[in-house]
Amino acid sequence: MATAVSTGRAWRSVSGLGAVTRACHATALRTQYDALVIGGGHNGLVAAAYLQKGGVNTAVLERRHVLGGAAVSEEIIPGFHFSRASYVLSLLRPHIYRDLELRKHGLKVYMRDPHAFTPMLEEGVGGRPPRSLLLWSDMDQNLREIGKFSERDAQAYPAFNTHLEKLAGAIHPLLDAPPVDIPGVTQGPLRRRLAALRTLSPLIKSGFKLGKNIPDFYELITAPILKILNRWFESEPLRATLATDAVIGAMTSPYNPGSGYVLLHHVMGELEKKKGAWGYVEGGMGGVSKSIANSARAHGAAIFTEQEVEQVLIGQDGRAEVLC
């Protein structure tokens, strides 16, 4: 079997008998595995679960005392656990959710609804509290909320939502498609080029789905999101709320080119078969990693924490020796 060594995802070499590891302080760690995944973040755990499920004897080595990487829950204040980095769940590919049976292995999600709250810095009128904007999964509720600031925006919002969903639906299949084999298409013998042409198929299908919307799609992924939002809407609370999804997690500004794609990426989110949905995980985001680890272990994978890999040595026979 081919050697596989990973720093968060599985690699496969052309030859070899297995990956050999020498642990510093884990007597349960055997001397040989078919695959080693170095790093027990959620991506590494998914790789390990699939490898083991496919019959590849796999071990995970995580440097820290806790699994999860950025999707981790830790006791920051005594008695209270927090999500330390990632804090809300979506975009977990449905086939991973299904193949690894994450719900069976402990993943429990509460849908985020309402999903946006924008308070206004203003004085209340007639003794009422200051206004705020709430956005829900229910369109009628959203239109009533938006209408508090602009009836024109309330009328435009359904069309804007449909427009984004159409663009997202056209490119959504690309998330699970392999990248285009550009060297294969442009170089090598004819047989290889013909085989590589198949990798263009998902891209071509997305192009046909976009159709006359290709210019709109190009603008969305290249323009600052506020350029687009200003064209659709007049009320600042709504523009600010929508712009949030174009910058969150991206370390960018709504005035920066490319921020539009971040908004589209959020629209492509999916959770428990519900498009555009986001949710809170019971136990914090560490619950995601824990369920993936539980699935990997159920298939027979070995997972070790407090194992800092110092060196990976590749022998002439293709075997990988991992020193902790």
Image: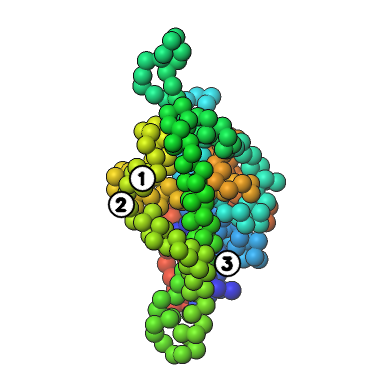
> Which mark's residue is nearer the viewer, 3 or 1?
1
Quick check: can you spot residue 175? Answer: no
Task: Give the alpha-carbon distance from disc 1 to disc 2, as whole Å.
Answer: 16 Å
Q: Is 237 situated left or right of 37 in this image?
A: left
Q: Amino acid at mark 1?
A: Arg
Q: Is residue 165 left or right of residue 241?
A: right
Residue 217 falls in image quadrant: bottom left
In this view, the mark in front (2 or 3): 2
What is the CA distance from the residue labelled 3 to the residue labelled 1?
A: 56 Å
- Farthest top residue? 127
At a point 51% along the width and 60% down the height, the residue shown is: 170
Amino acid type for the residue under numbered disc 3: Asp
Callout 2 secondary element: loop
SS for dot 1: helix
The crowd level at tag 1 (other Cα within 10 Å; few <14, some 14-19, many 20+) is few
- In the drawing, what numbered circle is on residue 257? 2
Q: Nearer the viewer, residue 53 or 239?
A: 239
Q: In this rendering, is residue 292 above or below 312?
A: above
The quarter of the image holding the N terminus is bottom right
Q: x, y (%) of residue 165?
A: 52, 51
Identity of the residue drawn at 36% across and 19% down: 122
Give the residue at x 48% y 51%: 163
Judging by the rendered image, the residue that carries numbered circle 1 is 231
Precedes in sequence: disc 1 or disc 2: 1
- Point out residue 268 in the picture as x, y percentages from the top left corner: 51, 51
Residue 34, disc: 3
Q: Is residue 317 above or below residue 297?
A: below
Q: Where does residue 149 sit, x and y in percent of width and height?
A: 42, 28
Residue 208 badge: none
Considering only order in the chain, which callout, 3 or 2, is on the residue closer to the N terminus? 3
Work out whether mark 3 precedes mark 1 in sequence or the reverse, and give the earlier one: 3
